[in-house]
Image (spheres, rainbow, N blue to C red):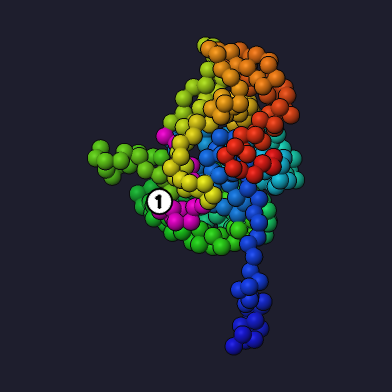
Amino acid sequence: MSKDIIKEYGNVLHDPASITERPLEVLSVGPKLDIALGGGVPEGSLFIMTGPEKVGKTVTALTFCANAQKHYERKVYYANIEGRLKKRDLQGITDLSLDAEKMQIIGSTEGNILSAEKYLSIIDNIVHTQPGSLAIVDSFSALSSESELTGDLSDMQVMSVQKVLAKFCRRISNVLPINRVTVVGITHLMANLQRFGRGKTKVEKSGSALKYQVDVKLHTSHSTALMQGDTQIGQTVHWQITTSAIGPPGQKVESHIRYGKGIWKEMEMADLMIDFGLISKAGAWLKLPNGEKIQGKVNLAKYLEENPEEYNNFRKEVFEMVGIDYEN
């Protein structure tokens, strides 16, 4: 019997004693999210971010890509389904390489509008043939099936996208960890027109297809302005971790985004340094362990930007305090 199986399917039978866990790299998002997630996002995951528009989901995804490129030498494929991605969005992320060998954009062109079936087939192909890569889907909520794109407006088949998504999830779920491919998906919270004001007013526009396959999921309902004096220099995204592959779910995290930079890791580290008592605080003044005094968190963040070794030392200390292995 065993010989017949091996002859038909290859070497798929293994001695239980020989099975060992393949160590997976844990990819960094940003200091605060990494800590809340128990270290970051394991490669080979389906990683979903959901929330309303303009709250920082795309910037967070692009920062994640930049970290993967810089620290883990991963190639990024970005499915620009919404068609809103601009060159300045990419240029506004620190360390994000736009070299074609390190990043490629997938998108419709004039005369070739990609349907849900085509987009997901491309991502499926990447999952199966490009081990170690990242695939960003921005967004699952904007997918339109072939029948929706070619049919009459009065005959929209909403469920057809859900069926395509469900098949896509089934096809990639077991392949992701084997090929170490990480799929990052963005979904939107949309008005629930079927509730007529009763109960939940917004629902995630991707249905239940992703619900049962997701490894890591972040949910945000809003962001707030990040100010320097009277000038808005970024935004603070208020995340809740609903699913985590390593750390416990349910934690709430405030992640800082700096316009023209991405996730402002130095500002997040300034918060952590204060929270963990690594520096003393007296009013607006902050005192470093070496005795140097700095006024305000923004100036502390600038100090860490100008002194990357100090940033890395503090990051290592914080991560060790919470029991997370420090790497990059």
Answer few, some or many: residues within 10 Å of disc 1's Cα (few below 14, many 20 plus, some between 14 and 19).
Answer: some
Where does the N terminus fall, quadrant-wise? Answer: bottom right
- Is 312 rendered above or below residue 82? above
Rendered residue at 66%/83% (across/down): 7
Q: Which residue is mark 1?
A: 207
- Is 309 rendered above or below residue 281? below
Tell me which corner region of the image, top left, top right, bottom left or bottom right, holds residue 11. bottom right
- Element at label 1: loop
The answer to whether residue 139 of the structure is visible from this angle is no
Q: Is residue 60 left or right of residue 291?
A: left
Rendered residue at 52%/21% (across/down): 226
Asked if the stretch drawn in magenta spans residue 217, the answer is yes
The answer to whether residue 95 of the structure is visible from this angle is yes
- Amino acid at pointer 1: Gly
Residue 167, given in percent of the width and then of the height, sits at 49, 61
Residue 94, given in percent of the width and then of the height, sits at 68, 31
Tell me which corner region of the image, top left, top right, bottom left or bottom right, holds residue 181. bottom right
Residue 59, given in percent of the width and then of the height, sits at 57, 34
Q: Nearer the viewer, residue 303 or 257?
A: 303
Which segment did they paint magenta?
208-221
